[in-house]
Amino acid sequence: MQQLQNYINGQLIAPAAGQYIDNYNPATGQVYALIPDSDAQDVELAVQAALAAFPAWSSTPAETRGRLLMRIADLIDQNLDRLAKAESVDNGKPLKLAKAVDIPRASSNMRFYGTAIQHFASEAHYMEGTEAINYTVRHPHGVAGCISPWNLPLYLFTWKIAPALAAGNCVVAKPSEVTPMTAYLLSELCMEAGLPAGVLNIVHGYGHKVGAAITAHPRVPVISFTGGTATGRSIAATAAPMFKKLSLELGGKNPNIIFADCDFTNALHTSIQSSFANQGQICLCGSRIFIERPLYEQFRDAFVEKAKALTVGDPLEDGTKQGALVSEQHLQKVLSYIDLAKQEGGSILCGGQQVQVAGRCEHGWFLAPTVIEGLPYNCRTNTEEIFGPVVTLTPFDTEEEVLRYANCTDYGLSSTIWTQNLPRAHRVAHQLHAGIIWINTWLLRDLRTPFGGMKNSGVGREGGFEALNFFTEPQNVCVKL
Ligand code: NDP
């Protein structure tokens, strides 16, 4: 059985305590690899390696740093098939999705920040009348801690480490222990690309051990975290008294608002994607669909028919639209929300139960796409993050009403609006409490835009120069001429 290793100081090494964790294939329910059960000792080694590498890396010209990131991007592209298969096996997502989205986006992240850093200019302010000039230098912080979740493993891992490295920081990173494989393969590619030792260190293991040790380490002044809101809160509690700089990308409970004048075919097709892509395990999925009453029944019936037609099956097979949920524990959590929805008075229009896939996947963790109606807009099912292939349908009559429904949760990550009335689209967009709004589309991403949420969906923004600002410390120098 394959045994993964930590990537510390340019080498693949075993965890200090010699302990390993079982790594499951969610489609078969079988253990297929072992990953390091690292602890604070391994984090200490990684931080020391990063500190030692920092003086040389931070003074390496941005162009050279960028070129190395682009070399890693090229290697990701060259290994597309291998990485996509690894991601699918590790996470349960359809291979086709990993090949079309996850892995290409990982190389785009590296390439984007490998080039962005070369356009990252300093500001200067001339003071009229006093004959002085200010210029602002942006210094890397030193060692950045990057902690990422299991839903889009390599995609979100590289979204953090690329800007951190491009800006001249060294990194101690922890992928989710549920999906460590592609981060491990990335460490091999970094070695092949010639990334200097200690610049990127990847420590595998549990959040409460490795993640907590990175967060609490006094020599890691900046933490970029993507994951659940409860974990974000605990990271903030540890980091705040140490005055660490924090970027938190947390959960969502995103509304998908369908007005009666929408382009029906497009709204329907894209809403199936935004509800069930990656088995609904994308923080940007629209799990609450609000439909203007005149269109309600037509949309509901067509939506349910399409949801029923999604093939749930072996993620490695071409025709599969829905793979496995990431873990048995997560499947049970999602099922418990379906029970809650029934208790709260919801009607299950389709799905609602586990699916047994014949053959090699008979013990996998599959769930039928689930559509629920008849729930109050402010019940628990409609306000808590489920993070699975489960959506609710709710009719509305007025803009005011749908804004009240949409804004009633503690989350504020993204929202989608479907209408052909452009003034209304903008009016509604500006009143939604969400960091990311899509009008007549979903998950259309320009990497230059600010990415992140309001309220309990996070603090700070990733993307574009926002991330380079985050991973650098501005220093203003004022010169009297
Ligand atoms: P978790 O919060 O459980 O875990 C995220 C990462 O943090 C994992 O690597 C985890 O390790 C680690 N971790 C857990 N506990 C601690 C701790 N005490 N200190 C430091 N690190 C810790 O989230 P999930 O992995 O379950 O991911 C799903 C969540 O992520 C959803 O809520 C989703 O909405 C959110 N998400 C947000 C996105 C955004 O951009 N806003 C994008 C994608 C997902 P371990 O795996 O060992 O628990």
Image: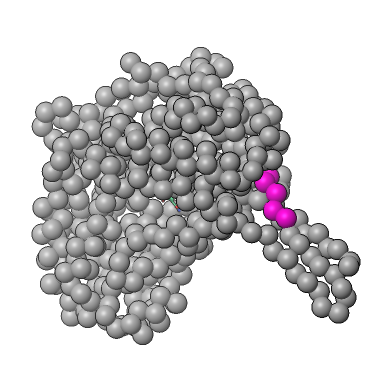
Q: Residue at x 35, y 21 (%)?
A: 33
Percent across and percent down for residue 177 are 43, 32
In the picture shown, does residue 457 fall above or below 124? above
In the picture shown, does residue 278 fall above or below 83? below
Q: Residue at x 16, y 69 (%)?
A: 265
Q: Residue at x 86, y 79 (%)?
A: 129
* Residue 411 shows up from this direction: no
Of residues 209 and 224, the one nearer the viewer is 224
Q: How is colour applied across the structure in the image? A: one colour
Quadrant of the rendered image containing residue 146: top right
- Asked if residue 383 lies left or right of residue 162, the reply is left
- Asked if residue 144 lies left or right of residue 228, the reply is right
Percent across and percent down for residue 167 are 61, 47
- Give the quarter of the figure containing the N terminus: top left
Tell me which segment is drawn in magenta: 137-143
Quadrant of the rendered image containing residue 416: bottom left
Percent across and percent down for residue 127 are 81, 74
Taking the magenta stretch, the answer to whether it contains residue 210 is no
In the picture shown, does residue 184 fall above or below 313? above
